[in-house]
Image (cartoon, rainbow, N blue to C red):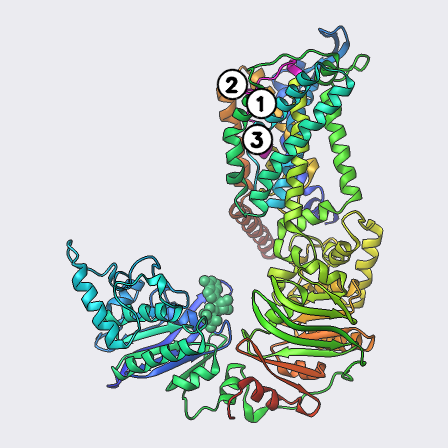
Amino acid sequence: MQNDVVLKMRGIVKQFPGTRALDHVDFTLRKGEIHALMGENGAGKSTLIKVLTGVYGKDAGSIWIEGGGDEAHIHSPQDAQNIGISTVYQEITLCPNLTVAENMFIGRTSGSVVHWKDYEKRADELLKNLGIPARAKQELSRCSLAVQQMVAIARAVDMKCKVLILDEPTSSLDDKEVAMLFGLMRDLKARGVGIVFVTHFLEQVYEVSDRITVLRNGQLVGEFTTEELPQVELVAKMMGKDLNDLADFEAVGEKSTGANEVVYEASGLSSSECRPYDFNIRRGEVNGFTGLLGSGRSESVRAIFGADRVTGGKVRIKGKDVKITNPHEAMKNGIGYLPEDRKRDGIIADLSVRENIILALQVMKGFFHPMSKAQMTQFADEYIKALKIKTASQDTPIKSLSGGNQQKVILARWLLTHPDYLILDEPTRGIDVGTKLEIQKLVLKLAEENMSVTFISSEIEEMLRTCSRLIVMRDRKIVGELKGEQLTQSTVMKTIAGGEQ
Amino acid sequence: MNLKKKLGSGLGQLLIPLIALAILLLFNLFRDPGFFSIRIAVNNAGNRVLTGNLISIIDLASELAIIAMGMTLVTAACGGQDISVGAVGAISGAVFVKMVQNFGGLNAGTFVLALLLAILVTILFKMFNGSLVAVFKIQPMIATLILYSCGRSIAYWINGDATPQLTSPILTAIGMTIPGIPVPTPIFLVLIVGILLALVFKFTNISLYTQSVGINQGAARLNGINPIAIKLLSFALLGVCVSVSSLIGISRLGQLNHKTLLVDIEMDAILAVAIGGNSLGGGKFKLSGSILGAYIIQMLTTTLYAMKVSPENVKAYKAIVIIIIVVAGSPVVKEKLTTLWKRLRSGAAARKEAA
Ligand SMILES: Nc1ncnc2c1ncn2[C@@H]1O[C@H](COP(=O)(O)OP(=O)(O)O)[C@@H](O)[C@H]1O
Ligand SMILES: [Mg+2]
């Protein structure tokens, strides 16, 4: 093992039922470096960390730790701790109603008589040493979140750690608190601790990290030093693209910028899951939200539909003030929403294709106005034909259809309500190429028929084909809006990446 | 092929309960050929009525069948069961009797008023259960445990007297027969409740909404359905069923015994839902299955009694049936059976090929 390497993971495989979360992943951590672990949501970051800390067992691969001689066998978080791997999770896992010192030493005191006085002294020393603005006797809940986070780190560090893992430690901190945390991280780095840093804030990576390992779909994309990897290339790698090879795409139809009339307009719209933002769409326009997975694009459109708890904002539909706080109100105002997670939020698995198609329209007609069976059958028939849904019959439970056909059923459900404004969040995820093209063409056709559509996709090509305007999100904020000439892969990627590049 | 498809969807759910019923009938036929005889007799009130084991089975199952219908809705919407139906039935009975006493006696007017009030109070109690389940997301069994354990005490407080007597031709007509009609009235009440529910199903979307909420609450909400309202509604309808059953129970005896009225009916009702092929985890449901389940349970009970099994042992036998059905319907067993079936089929195919 090289001298400065503290941790080496090679060929790590972790299989979950149905997904290979890690597929022969390598990871190397050196002494005194801050190493960012990057990847879109679901790339396997947390899983890699959980394998390292003994939360999950691995299916293949090996781990070496400096000074540990042979391969390290980590079967539990306790094992990990004993060989010098400490972890601070995103959620603070301390006890708020104990003192700072108690939190730092609880569970690690030796002997039956505990001399808290000594521990408090040690705690104070350590806190001072690390420059953490807290006192040993203070109750933890009286400290700010950042300081609590730092106490958790202090606890970890005092356990003689060689490797410190921070899984999204900054997501609930403000800028000043983040700066404080980074100060502490640099300090620890200077003491030779190797730090693994998981975050989805790109700027933060470039601020503190020395090296970056990128994962994608459970596979290692590569390890890079931060200097040699421009921000835009990092984004490209996370999205599985090669910047030098951004092929041109074929148009599937005429893109539509829509009429002048604004159909939907929101200002300061916010929900329990998204920050306030402004947005509008014109009649017959197709626009889209883009950004990395987890950048907040789904959360933003969910706020439009009232899918999460709406916390503020003014909404105007066709110039009239309206209040949309739940899906039913959105539907009554002519909005349809195809959710990102088809299995969880879209299909009613045990119900038939027919029932799944008519559901939204039936709800709009009202509780006391059930449609006749004949009417349902006719509607279902019409859309099964129009969208070429492959199903044995209308009575087949939707769960026995293929993913693409399930998606078409949900699409049919919303088309049947004839919305003025249709939101499609990842309508093409996990479906075959042919169906993808069909859906893209359908979107353009709908726009031609004056429907307004917001389209979200992880595949930039697809959005460039369909959208005349792209709203770019990063770290849960809108960071740009692109249209016309700006609608190219590299501009989009650069806007997503931000920074100087 | 076509037949198999049919069995897989519509009739499939009722297949096992129908087989169970057939087995019970055959068993009784061999055990005692006289079991099925039906005669005309004159009852205490001087009416000519049909009597016989089958009639009494269908008659005695009435309270259970009615409550099982309500339980089916709660199960479908909430994915759990209400275990307080018996105890709340006692409350309903207590309110009914108290009102009748307050009004100074039973006539058509006071009867309707007292019954409506009893139904109203029962619905309120069920809404209490329902809001614990729907709003506070407490497991239905836990949420109804409170009233399960204290419901009968509440009934006692309402009524003070342990067993108030009520004699009236109205109650006789409900609990036994209407003069001139030889079939026990509770049988008709099951029919009436069933028809009313069928009408509610026909003229509202309750069935579609309930199944959607039970299968995928989140997706149902994103389609504009209010899951809380649907769950509350299922409890309210169960409340009506409980009140009607409670009235039948009181009418049969002409008295209110808050300790024994509808006692232990919750377990039978859950069993009826399960025997009817409905998933206890909620979602798709068939009321007809649960009604069939209720009659099967009553036939099982009557058969066991006819075989001179002591009441304590009857409970044990029923418990065994519950276990068998729940295990047979569990995903693990289903999966095992499916793979076994597939293996048998592929084995047969392989043998055919070899031959
Ligand atoms: N306990 C689990 N069971 C099944 N699948 C899991 C489990 N944990 C994670 N996964 C799957 O493994 C993949 C990687 O997840 P994760 O490591 O959490 O990604 P990240 O932290 O990079 O967002 C995802 O597809 C996720 O759905
Ligand atoms: Mg993660």
On residue B266, the disc is 3
Front residue of A398/B44: it is B44
Chain for mark 3? B
Does A142 appear in magenta? no
Q: Secondary structure at mark 1?
A: helix
Name the image quarter holding the N terminus of chain A.
bottom left
Identify the residue position indicated by label 2 in the image. Answer: B311
| Residue under the image location 64 percent in, 50 percent down | B227
Chain for mark 2? B
Which comes sooner in the sequence, label 3 or label 2? Answer: 3
Which comes sooner in the sequence, label 1 or label 2? Answer: 1
**Which region shows up in magenta?**
B251-271
Q: CA distance from mark 1 to mark 2?
A: 30 Å
Chain for mark 1? B
Mark 1 on the same chain as mark 3: yes
Identify the residue position indicated by label 1 in the image. Answer: B158
* Residue density around tag 3, few if under 14, some if 14–19, many if 20 or more, within 10 Å: many
Residue B258 vertical placement versus A19 (above, below): above
C-beta proximity under 8 Å, tags 1 and 2: no
Q: CA distance from mark 1 to mark 3?
A: 22 Å
Residue A380 in view: yes
* Residue density around tag 1, few if under 14, some if 14–19, many if 20 or more, within 10 Å: some
Determine whether, in the image, residue A498 is placed left or right of residue B63.
Answer: left
Give the label, 3 or 2, closer to the camera: 3
Which comes sooner in the sequence, label 1 or label 3? Answer: 1
Quarter-wise, where is residue A115 in the image? bottom left
Q: Mark 1: which amino acid?
A: Ile
Residue B323 in view: no
